[in-house]
Amino acid sequence: MRLMIGVFIGLGLLIGAGFWMNDWLLDSSVRLVQQIEVVHEQIECGNWAEASFQVDELERKWDKEAKWWPVFLEHEEMDNIEFSLARCKEYVSRRDDALSMGQLAETRVMIEHIPRKEEITLENIL
């Protein structure tokens, strides 16, 4: 009987940790996407100096928000986002609006995809 109680407590903790991780990833990705939107708006306005500053701010937020993501996620996805951010930073510094916007869109999709991919759903389990 004690063994069953221990198993159920362990299972409950594991499931609870999974839901907590999902919520944490979602909140973190929402903050990053909001920063991407700020950069996007600055580029649309043609304010390249502010866009460059906001891209630097996006990198700082990425470093802060995603420092624990490798514990839960595949490193390849993290690398792809970092490469995308580096390309975006260079495009903004060159004042190339089309490439900057495209790279921001790609980065947004990659960041939004992570919580959906890690979500605890029947589809992801099976």
Image (cartoon, helix red, strand yellow):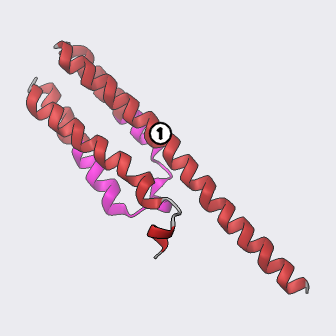
Q: Is residue 119 above or below residue 25?
A: below
Q: From the top left corner, tell me how far across and down residue 93 is, in percent.
A: 15, 26
- Under mark 1, the amino acid is Lys
62 on left or right of 47: right
46 on left or right of 111: left
Q: Residue at x 15, y 32 (%)?
A: 100
Q: Is residue 74 above or below residue 48?
A: below
Give the extent of the magenta segment. 59-84
Q: From the top left corner, tell me how far across and down residue 98 is, in percent.
A: 9, 30
- Which quadrant holds residue 36? top left
22 on left or right of 93: right
Front residue of 68 and 29: 29
Q: Is residue 123 above or below residue 55?
A: below
Where, quadrant-wise, is the N terminus in this rendering? bottom right
Q: Residue at x 8, y 27 (%)?
A: 96
Q: Residue at x 45, y 37 (%)?
A: 30
- Which quadrant holds residue 84? top left
Q: Residue at x 37, y 29 (%)?
A: 35
101 on left or right of 74: left
Q: From the top left corner, tell me how far across and down residue 25 is, in percent.
A: 50, 49
What is the magenta segment's predominant secondary structure?
helix
Front residue of 25 and 116: 116
Residue of label 1: 64
Q: Is residue 87 magenta?
A: no
Q: Residues within 10 Å of mark 1 (few under 14, many from 20)?
A: few
Q: From the top left corner, tell me how far across and down residue 21 is, in percent.
A: 57, 55
> Residue at the front extreme?
122
Q: Is residue 82 magenta?
A: yes
Q: Is residue 22 above or below residue 92?
A: below
**How many numbered marks appear?**
1
Q: Secondary structure at mark 1?
A: helix
Front residue of 9 and 50: 9
